Image (tube, rainbow, N blue to C red):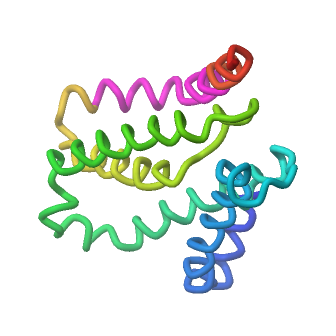
Amino acid sequence: QTLIFAYFVNKFNLWKPTWIAVPFIIIATLVLGCYNHYLLDINLSFGETRNWITFGLVFVFIGALMRKNIYKIDNSRLLSNNVFNACMIAVFAATSIIEFRLIRYDGYIFKDIFASTYPLAIFTFLFFKNIKSNSKWLTVTARLAKEHSLNIYIMHLIFILGADATHD
């Protein structure tokens, strides 16, 4: 569904209103998702808060926005610096762990995304984007991703379900 929506956004050149909508979708996702217990305290099913609009669409369009601005990113001394990106990954990974510890409630927490998930994803992408293509480490990981991306995706879902099943 996300890719179908993205196709129509691209076909009818609806990028600007879509990018304007993305921050509002992120806020709604956070308020109705992991922060719902503290802000609204209403009972929503996982499917109501984690669907193609609130989850898939946001990350696809964040990626599209980054792609649209790739030249600005490449020319930014800060964003093209992997030491900076690695530091940001560490900061947002730590804040994700802190959010996880503070917001822990019922069984949905392992499947939830937090406020720090978005910048963590962005800086992780920038980190790997900035690795030189002739890097031996990159060629090994690229080959693994190319050959095993479906398996990696399936295993991450199994890990999430396993973690969810063992949650107190």
Does residue 3 appear in the picture of this structure? Answer: no
Q: What secondary structure is the stretch in magenta mostly built from?
A: helix
Report the side of 43 relative to 132 (left or right): right
Figure label count: 0
Say which quarter of the image contains residue 54: bottom right
Which residue is at 18% across, 33% downward?
135
Q: Is residue 29 above or below residue 134?
A: below
Which residue is at 75% across, 32% downward?
106
Say which quarter of the image contains residue 67: bottom left
Quadrant containing the C terminus in the rendered view: top right
Please state the horizontal and vertical placement of residue 63, each as a whole percent of the image.
48, 60
Q: Which residues are magenta?
A: 139-157
Say which quarter of the image contains residue 138: top left
Report the side of 44 relative to 72 (left or right): right
146 within the magenta span? yes
21 within the magenta span? no
Please state the horizontal and vertical placement of residue 52, each as a whole percent of the image.
74, 55
Q: Nearer the viewer, residue 44 or 52?
A: 44
Does residue 36 appear in the picture of this structure? Answer: yes
Q: Is residue 136 above or below residue 64?
A: above
Q: Nearer the viewer, residue 21 or 137?
A: 21
Please state the horizontal and vertical placement of residue 107, each as a whole percent of the image.
75, 30
Quadrant containing the N terminus in the rendered view: bottom right
Q: Nearer the viewer, residue 72 or 121?
A: 121
Which residue is at 46% across, 51% downward?
116
